[in-house]
Every structure is written in structure tokens, then in C-alpha cells.
Amino acid sequence: MIAFVWFVAVILCPLLQGRPCSCSLCEKAQLVRLPDFDNLFVNEHLLWNDLMDGVAACVRRCFLDTRCRSVQVNRNSSRCSGHATAFASPTKIYPPAAVSQYSRLYLLPKAAHFIGSACTIDGDCHVATSACNDGVCTCQIGLWFSPSQQACVTECSTLGSGLVRYPGYAIWRNDVSEYTSLEETSCPQLCRDTCQSIEFDGERNRCIINTATYLRVSSTDQGQHPQWAYYQRNCAA
């Protein structure tokens, strides 16, 4: 479920260092509010999380940052956070979003068809080498999303805390450590520090830590299995 919010250009587009905003910003902007994210805080692809004077100021900052695609606003704490991707559903966030009363999430127009947005087919995802993965636009398996380049890339210098889930995939013979008797929801929280990817074996409820990624292993170790899920770390913003 989504809701639309209109912001008038005169609020969003003040003079910036003596120069007027570009015409593309000086039109009415239709924000998309995602009510499913109400009272939650998403830490994925976080660009900033600062005190700001109102929703309009928060949205304006995101408009003027070429990396920013969505914002979260907390009317109680006056916190504004900008994010480098769109979002689709709280059930597609790994690890899950935290509880944050009075928080609201808005997608800017430039979030449409971008990484993180909802999709049904690959054609819904307009970033090069992205795909519709389990209802969300993500980079193709083994690639990283770079917030600074706004693109799917083969190298990631610094890893973020979030992960992307690829159901039905696995890496064979590259295990570093293993945890047993776990639910899948607990698995992503074990991927920290040197962990680059993690797998959940749904047949035996095992969580397996890796320091390699799907494209960094030999083709014979790139596995597929309907009861497994492969998770890869995000690049840091």
C-alpha cells in the first residue's frame, strides 16, 4: 500500500548559493509514502541522519543530493535520514528495520525503477545489470550496489551493515564457519566484520559464513538449491 504527498516547488527549491534550482526541481514533486514502514527505522544505504527543521527541509536536502532517493522523517525527534536507494517492503530488509515511533518513509520521484524499488519483472528495474529479485530491484547476484556511483559494480571497498537476499542460490565449498539450529531470520545478523556473504540452508537450519561472494568463486562452486538462500553484504554509503 502506498500514499502520495505533494510538495510545492517554492518550498523545495530555494536559491542555492545564489543560483536558482534547475527546472526539473522547480515543479511540483509527488512523493510516495510507504505506510508499511510507519514507526520503523531503516539503516540500509544511509547517507545521513541529522536533526532538521521539518519535512520540507529534509526532502529538499535529498533533492539536492544526487545520491539520495528516499528519506525518513521522525516528527517527534525532528530526525531526517537520507538513503541512496528506494525501498519496497519491511519484509525485504536484512537485518530487519528497527522500531522508531513516529517515523515515516518517503520515496522521491527519482527512486522510481531504482535499486530497492518494488518490481514484478526485470524490465521494471532500470539500473544497468540490475534484476527483479524476489519482488525487489537489486543488482544481479554477485554484484554490489555503489551509492557513490549509483550503479551496480564488481568491487566494493567498504562494506555496509545491510544485506541483499537471493533465494535459491548458494556457494559450495567456501565455508568459513557454521551455525546450526537457527531460524533464517537470525542468519543475517551473524554476517559482520570480515563476512562478505552468508547462506541459509533451509534443509538443516544451518547458517554458513563466507568471506567470498558468488562471482569470486569458481563456476563449479556457484550453486542453486530451492531450499537455500544466499545473502551478500551491501556497499557502505
Image (cartoon, rainbow, N blue to C red):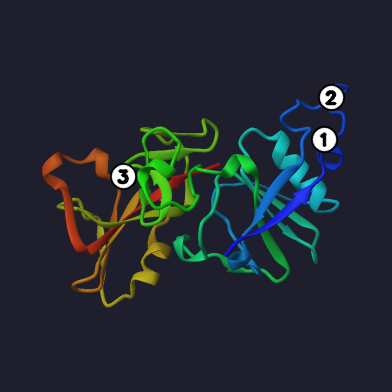
Q: Which residue is mark 1?
A: 13
In primary-sequence order, the first of circles 1 and 2 is: 1
Q: Residue at x 69, y 62 (%)?
A: 104
The three-letter amino acid code for the residue at tag 2 is Pro
Of the image marks 3 and 1, the number of the one nearer the N terminus: 1
Above or below — where is 176 with respect to 130? below
Q: Residues within 10 Å of mark 3 (few under 14, many from 20)?
A: many
Determine the residue positioned at 61% across, 36% down: 67
Report the residue marked by disc 2: 20
Give the residue furthest to the bottom.
181
Q: Which residue reaches farthest left?
A: 220
Residue 76 location, quadrant: bottom right
Earlier sequence position, callout 2 versus callout 3: 2
Label 1 and label 2: CA atoms lie apart by 8 Å
Q: Amino acid at mark 3?
A: Ile
- Horizontal relation, residue 142 to residue 88: left or right: left
Looking at the rendered structure, the kind of residue marked 1 is Cys
Give the label on residue 104, or none. none
Q: Which residue is mark 3?
A: 141
**Do callouts 2 and 3 mark residues in contact (Cβ within 8 Å)?**
no
CB under 8 Å between discs 1 and 2: yes
